[in-house]
Every structure is written in structure tokens, then in C-alpha cells.
Image (cartoon, rainbow, N blue to C red):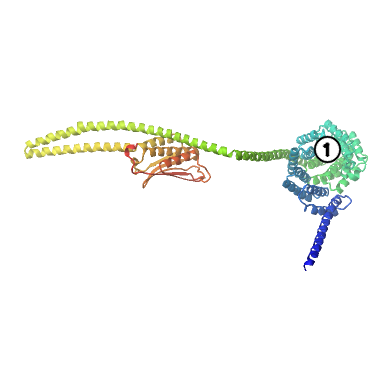
Amino acid sequence: MKRYCPILLFLLLIFSGCTQKEKSSELTSVQDSLPIYLSLANDIQINYALKQEYAQKAFSIVVKQKNDSISRFNLFKIANRYYNMNDFKSYHEISQLVLDRSISSKDSASIAKAYTYLGDYYSSRVISDSAFRNYFLAQKIYLQINDQHNLARTLLSKASLQYNESDFFESEISVFKALSILKNKKNVNDQLYECYNLLGILYNEREEYEKALEYQNKALNTLNDKSIPADLQLKATSLNNIGFVYMRMKNYKQAIIYFEKGLQEKNLFEEKTILYAMLLDNLAYSKLKSKRLDGLPDQFYRSLKIRDSLGLKMAKVSNQIHLSEYYAFKKDTLRAVQFSKQALFLSRSSDKLANTLLALKQIAVVDPENASKYSKEYIQLNDKMLKAERNMGEKFSRIEYETNEIKDQNSSLQEKNKTLVYVFSICTLLGLFFYVYKTQQAKNRELIFKQQQQIANEDIYNLMISQQNEIELTRIKEKKKVAQELHDGVLGRLFGIRISLDSLDKLDEEAAVSKRKKYLTELKNVEQDIREISHDLNREKSELINNFVSILGKLFEDQRNTYSSKLITTFDPDIKWDLISNIEKINLYRIVQEGLQNCNKYANADIIKVEFKNENTNLVLTIEDDGIGFNTNKTKNGIGLHNIEYRAKECKGTVTIKSAKGEGTILTIKVPIEPNNNLHNDI
């Protein structure tokens, strides 16, 4: 069995090699057929259905290929085939596909080209704002990659779009931008022709006829370059445009010359049937205006028939208006009205208001009985058209501005990303240095903070000492007063009563009784005086103990006088202030001061409540406001809250903060009351 194994392995390798060869051959066959499909899809000799089939076969091959420059190039070719077939739906889908692939590959040139394809699509669909946006995006990319040739083409496409939307001024600017690029370039006569031709049309619309003729003749001169294909019939186009300028100038004799020259161009009817019909209509109209009726109205009817066969509905409007003018000239009012009504009906099926305005103007002339109605509609539509043109111009400007802003933001983000990379690299190298520096800086800040705290504590302590000195002076005065009263009043009276009582021994019992009652009453009065003096002494002690409360009262009074928010303060009478040390009182005072400051700066509160409460062996300070609140999970503690926590810690206390956005804030400080504190430390 072993001797057959090498044979079987050899046969397997041969079979595998044949299979791979067949697959490779099949793949090569498919690749070779792609150019054929692309060529057939563009062959004017083949009917529409077959061209569609070949285009679809080409697409089926390319769409399976790897996303590289060659496959994207072929996708553009397929999109062109669909555009030539007027299958704009397929053209749009493939243009969008190649745009997505270009973006994923970061192929700037292909991205810009895809934008121009999409611009052409939206332009053909008369979706002007979308067309403008895509042209402008392409323009920005071509500018970035310095592709001058395609930048000029894109500017021309944008200028044509702006012209079609009657944004003549901006269209002129775009054309001159293209010209400034092309003026020093070689082999760009086709683009120069487009620039000069469009400028001629623009100036004709603006009734600057001398300039219009100047640029139309420049366009005609560029056609001396034999590299421009004759089948484009650009010479006939220029002759028609020059004739049209003369027609607008009412120089109909000169216009007829150019229209006749244009019609004499070789193969014009076969290669540019639409242009042939236009020249024929313009020639007939110029003859009518110059009162030369030879060939009329046959030339009008022939042009109308051609346009009708090509499905050019809006072009037919021109023929119908001209026929109406012809029959009005011939005094055939019935036909004149008939053709003007046909023109009006057909023009209303389009969103091109200019055609409707021309039809209304003509029908108002040939139908004078209804002229006022048509004139009124003319005025309304004219205002609407002017407003639409102005809005479209503004929309183009807004699109340009918004696109620039987005691009600027993207550029800014890219620059920021680069900067972040550089900063990250530098931070990595210098991280240790910054760590040491920041640590030392933090220690310095902490030291400065403690020094500031010490100074602040000394200020408060001095204030409290000053208050205590004043109370001490008052207490000395009160003691002196009590001593004087005891010495001069109580002791004197007691001495007098004692002497009087001694004298009772010398009296008989009966006389002594009445005297004794009198002296007992006098002793009661002395007792009452001693009680009042005792009360005064107790009140002095209470004032001594409550001196801290009075200091806080001054702070609260300043708060009420300075800020509009209502301040409510509460002191629990059960608090034993004599058990609280001066250091703790200083810290509590500072906490209240900081809490009020935070309410004033950040809370935007209407009501602020400050409460001191006794809870078992703890003194509880609560500062509450009904302000805007904040998210305690997201907001980092500022220096104010840090100070409060630090001071609470100095008092061996705790800090609790409850807050939420729109629900106010409650700050709670709980400080233990030490029973071993001495009264002589109190304020």
C-alpha cells in the first residue's frame, strides 16, 4: 500500500494544479471581457436595452473587485455609460458607491471626482442646492491637492449652475476664477471655450452687449484649435450665441447672417439636432422681426416638429410664442391666441417661471379682453421668480459658508490631533519632570494655604479677643457696681436692722412684737435686693457664653444687608457653648462664612437657612439653600468646599453634601462636643 501513496499524491497535485489553472483562466477571461462590455455599453449603434445589459455586466465584474484605484476608475467609466444613456438613477447609485469607496480609501482625487459626478446628477435633476454643495466640496478638495485642471472644470460646472439659477454675479466670479487657472495652461482650449462662451451668455443676459460679443468672438477664436472635436458643433453654438446677442440688440439683419451661418455647419442636424432646431427658430424669429417673411411660418413649424419629436417641451414654448407673434402680425387673431394659450399651458407644467412669463406677456398682447388678468398673473409670477432667484443666491452663499465652516472645523480637528500626538510625545518624555514639579507645587500650595488659614484664624481670634476685652470691662464695671450696692445698700441696711434688733432686748414683749414685724419686712426687702443682684450676675454669665452667637449675628446682619436672598437662622437653646473651644468656634465661624459665600456666588438662591442644633454629644451645623444645585458625582470640589472639609477635620467633625440640579443644596457639618473643654477658653 505504501508504494501507491507517492503515485496518489502526484495525481492529486496534478489535479489541483489543473483546477487552479482553470480558475485563473476563467478570472483572466472575465477581466478581458470588461473593456468589451464598457465599449459596447457606449456604442451608439446598439439599442438601449443591450447597452443597459452590457453596463450591468461590467458593473457585476467591477463591484466584486478589491477597492483599489483601478476598480474605482472603472466604476467612474460605468457611471459615465449610464449618464450617456440618461439612466440617472443608476448613475447616481454608482457615483455614491464610488464616493463611499473613495472616502474609505482616503483617495482625495476620487472623492472630488465623485462629488462632481453627484453635482452633475443633481444639476440634471434641477436640484440646484444639492448640485452646488457637491460642486463646492469638489472645488475645495481640488484646491487642496492642487489639481488645477479639474478645479477649473468644477468651477465651470458651478458657474453654469449659478447662471441657470440667475445668480449672474457669482457665476461671473466663478468663470473668472477658472480663467485665472487656465490662462497659463496648455491644451485647455476646450475649457477656455466654455469660459468665454458662458461669459458671453452672462453679459448678454445683463444687457452688456459689447462685452457679450467680445467674449463670444473669443470663444469662436479658440475653435481654431483642431484638437477640439468637430462633432461637438461648438462653432455652430457660438454662431447661434452671437446671432442671439444681435437679436437682443434688435439688429435682426446681423442676427440673420449668423443664424444662417450656423445652419450651414456640416452634419449639424445629425450631430446636434437640438442646436439645429434652436438656430432654425431663432432665424425665423429674426426674419419676422425684420419683416422678412420668406420661409415663414414653415421654419417655425419645422423647428416645433423637431423639438416635439425630441420631447423638448420647454423649447416648444418658444416656438409657440413665436408662432403666436407671427399670426398676430398676419392679423390672424384666432391662431395667435391659440398658440399663446398652448404656450401658456405647456409652460405651467414646468417650474421654469421665465417661460410662463413670456407666454403671459404674449397672450396679454393677442387677447386684450383678458389682458388685465394675464398682466396681474405676470406681475405675481415675476415677483415670485425674483424672490426665488434671490433665495437661491442666498442659499448658495449659505452652503458655501457652512461647507467652509465644516472644512475649517475638520482642518482644525486634524491640526488638533497632530498637536495632541506631539504633546503626548513630549509629555511622555517629560512626564517625570512634571510629576516632581507638580508634587512640589502642590506642597507649596498646601503650605501657603495653611499660612493663610493661620492668618485668618489669628484675625478671627483677635476679633474675638477684642470682643472679650469689651465684655471684661463691662463685667468689671458690673462687679464694681454690685460691690457698691452690696456695701452701700445691702450691708448698710443689714447693719441698721441688726442694731435695731439688738435694741429689742431692752423693750418689753408687747412693744417688741410690732417692732420685730417691721424689721422682718425690712429683711425681706433686703432678700429681694440680693436676688436681683444675683439675677444680674447670671445674665452677665449668659452674655459671656453667648458672645460667639453675637459674633455670628454680626455676620448674618452683613449678609442680609448685602444680598437680596432671604436668610433664616436658628440656634438650638440646648447647645452648651461653654463646652466648645475657641479653635472650634473659629472653624465653625469660617465654615458658616464660606458656606454663605458659596450660596451667594453659585446657588442663585432665594432662601438660605443656617441652623445650629444639638444632637446628643454632637453640634450639627446645617446650611441649606433653594438654589440651582449641582451634580455631586460630577462636580469636583473647589477650594471653598476643600476649606470646609479641612476645617471640619480640624474639629474632628464630618461633612455631608446633598445636592442635585434644580433641587438646591444641603451642607451638614457634625462636630463632636468634648465635655473636657474648659470654660476659660470660651468666648
Considering only vertical position in the picture, is 351 above or below 31? above
Considering only vertical position in the picture, is 278 above or below 488? below
> Which residue does the image show at 58% across and 39% down from the upper left?
431
Query: Crowdedness of circle 1 by 10 Å Cα count: few (<14), some, many (20+)?
Result: some
Residue located farthest toward the front when viewing the structure as drawn:
3
Residue located farthest toward the bottom when viewing the structure as drawn:
1
Residue 388 in the figure: left or right of residue 681: right
Q: Is residue 285 visible?
A: no
Provide residue 21's location: percent of width, then percent of height. 82, 57
Residue 507 in the figure: left or right of residue 493: left
Q: Nearer the viewer, residue 174 or 584?
A: 584
Quadrant of residue 552 within the rendered picture: top left
Amino acid type assigned to the residue bearing label 1 in the image: Gln
Q: Nearer the viewer, residue 587 or 53?
A: 587
**Element at label 1:** helix
Quadrant of the image for the C terminus?
top left
Provide residue 77's location: percent of width, then percent of height. 81, 48
State the residue position of label 1: 191
Residue 279 in the figure: left or right of residue 427: right
Q: Is residue 652 visible?
A: yes
Provide residue 50's location: percent of width, then percent of height. 85, 54
Considering only vertical position in the picture, is 289 above or below 301? above
Quadrant of residue 584 within the rendered picture: top left
Q: Nearer the viewer, residue 420 or 124?
A: 420
Provide residue 396's location: percent of width, then percent of height. 72, 39
